[in-house]
Amino acid sequence: MKLTKNILVLVMLISSVSVLAQSDRNRGIIWSSLRGLEYEVKAGINIGGASPIPLPSEIRKIDSYRPDLALSLGAEVSKWFGVKEQYGFIFGLTIESKSMRTDAQVKNYGMKIIGNGGEEVSGQWTGNVVTKFRTSNLTLPLLFGYKVSNRVNLKVGPYFSYVLERDFSGHVYDGYLREGDPTGPKVVYEGENKATYDFSKDLRKFQWGLRLGTEWRAFKHLNVFADLNWGLNDIFKKDFDTVTFSMYPIYLNVGFGYAF
């Protein structure tokens, strides 16, 4: 009997706290709405890759491309203003990954491979290159928003990313390496023989670019969005000269958000 009474008291206490919390939440939402503020939690998938623009002469053919699973999770705050609150500033914080795998045929491609004895050999590679690229980033978007209608928003602006984890590695096969330059000694890799490489430590820790996106309010609180993120600085450090051309991360992020 005493246990039952204690359980009833505990249930009533929890119910009271829940009601008060919901009441505070409702007041907070009303307060934010009156000041043109909106909050949103978002989840999505990144599809794309790191690529030179345009493709250099060293890359002769892309044999395969595969976008690995790359997720994003974040939150945004929007401040709307104007007579009809059509214009706004949007900022947020997102933790995300970007990745890809490619197999390409190249000629005189700058390369630093790890030989069979563990030694590094630099030169010009002609043959096939398999590349795995993956980064985990903490991203801050600073965007300008425009409401086309009550259900559709457009947004554009810069984003800034700090790279938490980085990987740019792979292997070469069915080809040969000219040590030093295109006329240097020839090292051949054929059949099952291949050599690995790893440029992960040569990736930048800071990336930035331009975001262009749109968002559609499907239901009262549910949004569907698509954002194109175009990197504007090379993924490699300034002093990295093995790969002789710049590469930029270009990704489409699609997903949904819950708006408060």
Image (cartoon, rainbow, N blue to C red):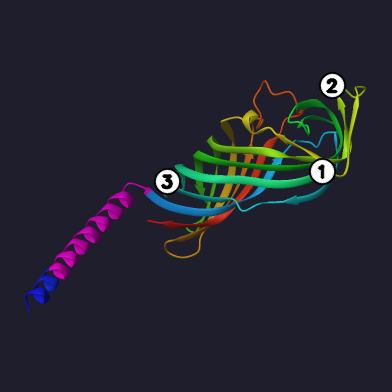
Give the crowd class for mark 2: few <14, some 14-19, many >=20 residues within 10 Å.
Answer: some
Quadrant housing residue 241 = top right
Left of 81 or right of it: where is 236? right
Q: What residue type is labelled 3?
A: Ser
Which structural element holds mark 2? loop
Q: What residue type is labelled 1?
A: Ala
Residue at (55% x, 38% y) in the render: 165
Q: Which mark is residue 104?
A: 1
Q: Which of 24 and 51 is in front in this view?
A: 51
Residue at (41% x, 56% y) in the render: 259
Quadrant housing residue 236 = top right
Horizontal and vertical percent position of residue 252: 63, 49
Which structural element holds mark 3? strand
Horizontal and vertical percent position of residue 94: 48, 44
Based on the picture, tell me whether residue 17 belongs to the magenta stretch. yes
Predominant secondary structure, magenta span: helix
Q: Name the residue under label 3.
A: 78
Q: Name the residue under label 2.
A: 180
Magenta part of the protein: which range?
Answer: 10-37
Horizontal and vertical percent position of residue 84: 42, 50
